[in-house]
Amino acid sequence: MSDIATSRDGGVLCIAFNRPAKKNAITGAMYQALADALKAADADAGVRAVLFEGGADIFTAGNDLEDFMHHPPSGNDSPVFQFLYNLSHAKKPLLAAVAGAAVGVGTTMLLHCDAVYAADNARFSMPFVTLGLCPEAASSLLLPALCGYQRAAEKLLFGEPFDAAEAREMGLVNKVLPAAELAAFARARAHKLAALPASSVRTTKALMRGTHVKAVEAQMTEEGAHFRKMLSSPEAKEAFAAFFERRKPDFSRFA
Ligand code: COA
């Protein structure tokens, strides 16, 4: 089965991260598959809701650091930016069911979803700064808007993980469920949305998201320019090497 597994369940398209051996870390090929699936969902009148899923103990470890080092995104047409573009411009409602760790884009992509359900074992983190990088997916705009500047700044600067209860309190998650109940609950919610008048659902989403869409796009472009430059920085190289060597990074020699 592919690292991104898509399946249709009536009007619901399920898109699942499916690379458990690498904690569902997302490669360029997986970003492309995600972008293509979202594009196809918007073009297919039969798809009325999209549900992102991961494994029972891992949503996704975020960007595949090895793939990022060897094949850094080159511009706005690279797979990761295509994914982010299609995610932020999706016309159909997006839902997510998060169990286990949701790292980096695994958390920031949720800011573009319309309903997020989390298992009680979910853990969220945005360790961009600790990796020598900067936020992406317009999270530097959307997170402060969601939960206030101080709280967003603490999450984005320290990059520390937080649990499902805190994510719920911040407004990132709609509901926290026992892990065993998550998948069925999220699917039922997706089917409920899929059964509603599709044009009303689309219009309501467009009205809510529409006022921000240009600002989101501009922020993503600016973040992307910094992010691409920072990927080849000595700080990022040290952070990535430290991850694979299972040691603490040492940033003391960088100004
Ligand atoms: N990129 C590439 N490989 C990754 C990865 C990533 N983001 N996350 C995990 N992996 C790989 C590990 O290298 C390891 O591979 P190996 O078995 O060949 O050595 C395997 O997946 C299992 O990871 P491990 O760290 O042993 O699992 P864990 O259960 O102890 O921890 C995480 C899970 C997600 C908390 C941890 O892997 C992690 O922090 N990953 C990095 C997350 C990250 O920084 N993402 C980038 C955000 S921009």
Image (tube, helix red, strand yellow):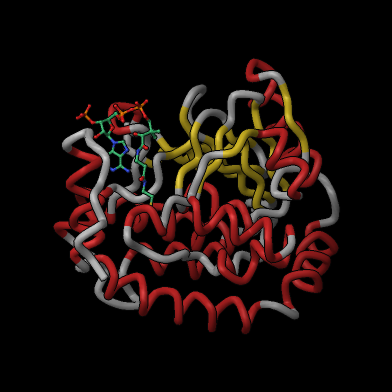
Q: On the rendered structure, is 213 left or right of 1?
A: right
- Vertical placement of residue 204 versus 57, above or below: below
Q: On the rendered structure, is 224 left or right of 75?
A: right
Q: Residue at x 35, y 70 (%)?
A: 227
Point out the image quarter for the C terminus.
bottom left
Q: Residue at x 52, y 29 (%)?
A: 100
Q: On the rendered structure, is 162 left or right of 230?
A: right
Q: Residue at x 63, y 57 (%)?
A: 111
**In front: 235, or 44?**
235
- Vertical placement of residue 91 versus 49, above or below: below
Q: Residue at x 36, y 32 (%)?
A: 23
The image position of residue 10, as x and y in percent, is 66, 38
Query: Looking at the image, in which quadrant does ligand 1 appear?
Result: top left
The image position of residue 253, as x and y in percent, is 19, 61
The image position of residue 30, as x and y in percent, is 33, 50
The image position of residue 203, as x and y in percent, is 80, 69
